Amino acid sequence: MEHRKLIETSCSHFNNDPRRMLDILWQIQNSLGWISPDTMELIAQLTNTYRVEVEGVVTFYAFFMSKPQGQFVIHLCEDIIDRYAGMLPVQNAFEQILGIKVGETTKDGLFSLHLTSCIGMSDQAPAALINDMVVTNLSPNKTKILIRTLKKTRNLASLVKTFGDGNNSHELIKSMVNNNILLKGDVLLGDININAGLNKAFSLPPEEVIATVQASNFKGRGGAGYSSAKKWLAAAATQADKRFVICNADEGEPGTFKDRVLLTERAELLFEGMTTVAYAIGSQHGILYLRAEYRYLLPYLESLLTKRRNEGLLGTDILVDETENTRFSFDIRIQLGAGAYICGEETSLISSCEGKRGEPKNKPPFPAVSGYLGYPTVVNNVETFCNIPRIVDKGAEWFTSIGTPESSGTKLLSVCGDCTRPGIYEFPMGITLGEVLSLAGAKDPEAIQIGGASGVMVGRADFERQLCFEDLPTAGAIMIFSSQRNILEIADYFMHFFIEESCGYCTPCRVGNVFLKQGLEKIMAGKGETSDLKYLQDLGKTIIQTSRCGLGHSSPKPILSTMKNFPLVYAALLKEHPDGRQAGFNIQHALDESRIIAKRRSIVFDPDLGGD
Amino acid sequence: MSDNKKITLTIDGKTIQAESGQSIMNACDAQGIYIPRLCDSTGLVPQGSCRVCSVKVNGRVVAACTQPAEDGANIEHESDEIQGYRKDLVRMLFHEGNHLCPICEASGRCELQAMAYRFGISQATTYPYLQPVRPVDASHPDIALDNNRCILCGRCIRASRDVDGKNVFEYVGRGIHKRIGVNGDCLADTNADLNDYAMSLEVCPVGCIIRKGEGFFSPVGERQYDSDKIGSNIENHTAHSSLGKLIKVHQIDPNDAIHDDIDQSNVNEDKS
Ligand SMILES: Cc1cc2nc3c(=O)[nH]c(=O)nc-3n(C[C@H](O)[C@H](O)[C@H](O)COP(=O)(O)O)c2cc1C
Ligand code: SF4
Ligand code: SF4
Ligand code: SF4
Ligand code: FES
Ligand code: FES
């Protein structure tokens, strides 16, 4: 086989270990451009797996290619934010200048074009990935220049004329991405003293580190809002000869990009946090699960890990206590994802780290008891880990003095959409939505999507509500939509997102979401009837209740929350009156029109027709 | 799994005994209480994907086949709400694939069809039909695959992997595009054999894995579910020992030697 040597080298680079399948596939794809059936066969032989298993992994992840690709693979973000920022003309420009449609490759083998979900650049949309390079603020004109330059230079680096702010200009990043940090708070984005928290932790017994965080009432920043200390206690209490600390940097929730900014500006704090938690629970191994969309940060992050190893902050025996005769060793590896929103769900993330299809696992057992390779595993969000050394350094009392009684500390918000100042804001917990909107310069805000696609859409009535765990919780995304926007179009896009990103494991999410979207489209086409609202509600309820993981528990929310908060938008499109029971409303009268159109009577409403 | 400690559950108000470590489904089977199921099959590791076995435990809906029974759990099983969900799920599976029962050779022994009968679903429903056009693989001399009827239960995958030790099947793709892949270009390319457990009538619940030349082997009226509705074997037996065989399954054992040098080698590719 042609590339036998290369494939053998890649597999042996990872010791032919199937648990490193994602790394193996990335390395091979970086050289060959795609994973052919023959390649799968050979990988399977070398790693002692089966070709169909390798195929299962390749076809699970959007960024692994099972068809030949061009030298430059373009992934254009198709999220609703980008659509409203002019993504369709950009797509047209790509298609026109390349002479191909989405999904195709140019004849000269230079370019392939694909659409993808949010790539974490919503404050600089429209945005796209070209291989691992991010291009932002696209316009049809800029698109044409990019392609012309690439055709000439065949060199990605030639695309970036000016670097973004902060570390984006670091020689290992050199990206046009901007941080757009618009408000610095006391905990994360203001001045910090690196390693102060870790050094303090090292002076305390591990239990006291956990106790401090527990006293601070800190809750995880990844969405679920679960007490981090509780999770660590469970992992620490589980008997095992190894424990794992995993940082969730999958940040796939549309409209969320705060972890990207932390990875760019506070990566050392993040590694410090992971080390602190490892010390607290007695873990030796850390993994940073980095979404593939952010692989432009990989060389920089690797360099920081090397730096910390050289400084004795990572590696073997980083803390030795001769009197107690205890030794603490901890190191971190970076696991690159490959384009799958579901891998942000902690058990899917673990499956993915194990080199498998990123499907959720059954809970129980919970990861803290049996996670990565069966070992007790703590999975926390990037922002969570960044908070920990700060809490340990400055104390629980300091931390609880910020925010609300139930939600202490600050929260990073990623603000995007119809506003003049999109970007990153670090607010104390409990800030009202209205305050955020006015600081961000929201333009005629009508509908705000809180917490990304899996969050809720709220209207003006909710602008006084507080962003915190006890009122309106969010993992960070605030998407602003003006009164010019079509709310149903937004909900429809989010359904598209969930259908694309469902892992397909369980029936309700795999199939039900497709039905939900079709039901919504029927209404959008003006063909909906009152009964369709009930249909969507019932179907949504079945999906939420019976789905296996958090994706299906949330996927109907775009429709259900817009139905609740914007009922008139739906009512205006229905053929009948929205409330059949209202006085003066005559269903028979309303049906006459349909009877005429359909040239027949209704088996539901004309009982004499013998319907059931 | 079971450490033989006796625990007590309440199911639809009725108190039953179970062994700690048992799944809710196994605990109920042993008491002659049938919880509907499609992706679960005796002897295979439970997977929890079809969700037809949904029950409500202490207010939360869970899959009975994978949920461990906990002492004192209050389980809702045949309430209108739960039955409604189950019906919806079975309807979803019908509408996801192409199911024309009258011309299907699985008719009468098909678990999906039998489940619909058990639930009283006989009419077309409000759901749209997705009408997929998936390729039929007739390459193998003895076995054909009609993926248009596949409900993605994964029983064939587990049977081939854990019982036959072969891995003929595996899931490929994701979301609504997920399907069953075979270990090769087509089934004839694999080491699939008619005598594999994965190809037996016990494994594929529908008419997707077809044993060539054996079609329509029972006349209408004598087919498996013509007289006995699905689940009646469990409802009519209270002795659970007669059910199923124990099949050894392979799972990752945390105590399996993990080579540190391999596992944590900090190798990542630079961008190229
Ligand atoms: C579909 C889905 C996607 C998720 N994506 C992310 C993500 O991108 N980042 C994240 O930190 N948590 C994500 N989560 C939440 C994680 O499962 C987990 O709760 C979180 O990483 C725990 O970290 P924390 O306790 O620090 O918040 C997701 C959950 C679901 C159900
Ligand atoms: S709800 Fe089911 S199909 Fe959807 S992502 Fe979770 S496990 Fe996969
Ligand atoms: S597989 Fe079952 S449900 Fe599908 S057509 Fe055949 S008998 Fe009917
Ligand atoms: S082929 Fe049959 S056994 Fe295999 S997943 Fe499909 S329906 Fe289940
Ligand atoms: S990058 Fe397009 S919406 Fe986030
Ligand atoms: S039988 Fe339990 S989920 Fe399928």
Image: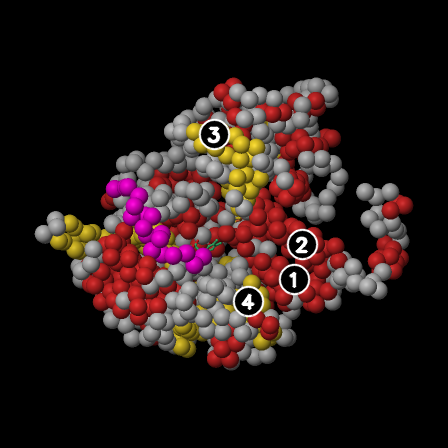
Q: Secondary structure at mark 3?
A: strand
Q: CA distance from mark 1 to mark 2?
A: 9 Å
Q: Quadrant of residue B107?
A: top right
Q: Amino acid at mark 3?
A: Ala
Q: Which mark is residue A536?
A: 2
Quick check: is the Cβ at mark 4 less than 8 Å away from ligand 5?
A: no
The reply to whether the magenta stretch includes residue A80 is no
Q: Are the residues tagged 1 and 2 within 8 Å (C-beta)?
A: yes
Q: Amino acid at mark 2?
A: Leu
Q: Nearer the viewer, mark 4 or mark 3?
A: 3
Colouring scheme applied when the structure was drawn: secondary structure
Q: Amino acid at mark 1?
A: Met
Q: Which residue is mark 4?
A: A449
Q: What percent of the width, then of the height, locates residue A274?
A: 29, 58
> How many C-alpha atoms fall within 10 Å of the one at disc 4: few (<14), some, or many (≥20)?
many
Q: What percent of the width, then of the height, locates residue A492?
A: 62, 61
Q: Which mark is residue A563?
A: 1
The reply to whether the magenta stretch includes residue A234 is yes
Q: What percent of the width, then of the height, locates residue A435?
A: 49, 77
Q: Secondary structure at mark 4?
A: strand
**Bounds of the magenta segment:** A224-241
